[in-house]
Image (cartoon, grey):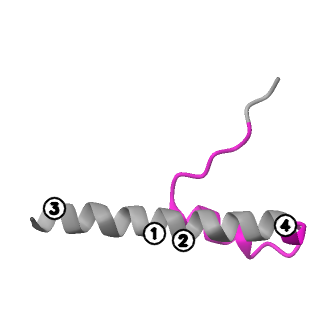
Amino acid sequence: MEKPYIAAEANECKQRAEDPNRHDDSRLIWAVLAVAAELRELRRLLAKRR
């Protein structure tokens, strides 16, 4: 069984969310993952400042 693609960066998730060739459900999931990835990056940057 082939493993699914895992996007690690917010911009990768955002690109997939904006892809008009994907189903709406898939695009919504990728959009949520993009937000989560951006929040992770913000948390990482805030932790560095402490």
Q: Left of 28 or right of it: where is 49? A: left
Q: Is mark 1 on a helix, strand or loop?
A: helix
- Image quarter of residue 22: bottom right
Distance from label 3 to label 4 (Cα)? 35 Å
Q: Left of 5 or right of it: where is 48? A: left
Q: Are marks 2 and 4 in contact (CB under 8 Å)?
A: no
Q: Left of 19 or right of it: where is 13? A: left
First along the sequence among labels 3 and 2? 2
First along the sequence among labels 3 and 4? 4
Residue count near mark 1 (Cα–Cα under 10 Å), binned few <14, some 14–19, many ≥20? some
- Mark 1, residue position: 38
* Along the viewing direction, whichever of 18 and 49 lies nearer the viewer: 49
Q: Is mark 3 on a helix, strand or loop?
A: helix
**Image quarter hosting the N terminus:** top right
Q: Is mark 2 on a helix, strand or loop?
A: helix
Q: Which residue is drawn at 73% across and 32% down?
A: 3
**In the rendered structure, which segment of residues is drawn in magenta?**
4-24
Distance from label 3 to label 2 (Cα)? 20 Å
Q: Do the residues labelled 3 and 4 touch (CB within 8 Å)?
A: no
Q: Residue at x 31, y 65 (%)?
A: 43
First along the sequence among labels 1 and 3? 1
- Mark 3, residue position: 48
Q: Left of 31 or right of it: where is 10? A: left
Distance from label 2 to label 4 (Cα)? 16 Å
Q: Do the residues labelled 1 and 4 touch (CB within 8 Å)?
A: no
- Three-letter amino acid code at the position of disc 3: Lys
* Along the viewing direction, whichever of 6 and 39 lies nearer the viewer: 39
Judged from this view, the residue extending furthest toward the left is 50
Expressed as whole percent of the image width and height from the top left, the position of residue 17 reads 72, 71
Q: Which residue is drawn at 60% across and 62% down?
A: 33
Distance from label 1 to label 2 (Cα)? 5 Å
- Mark 4, residue position: 25
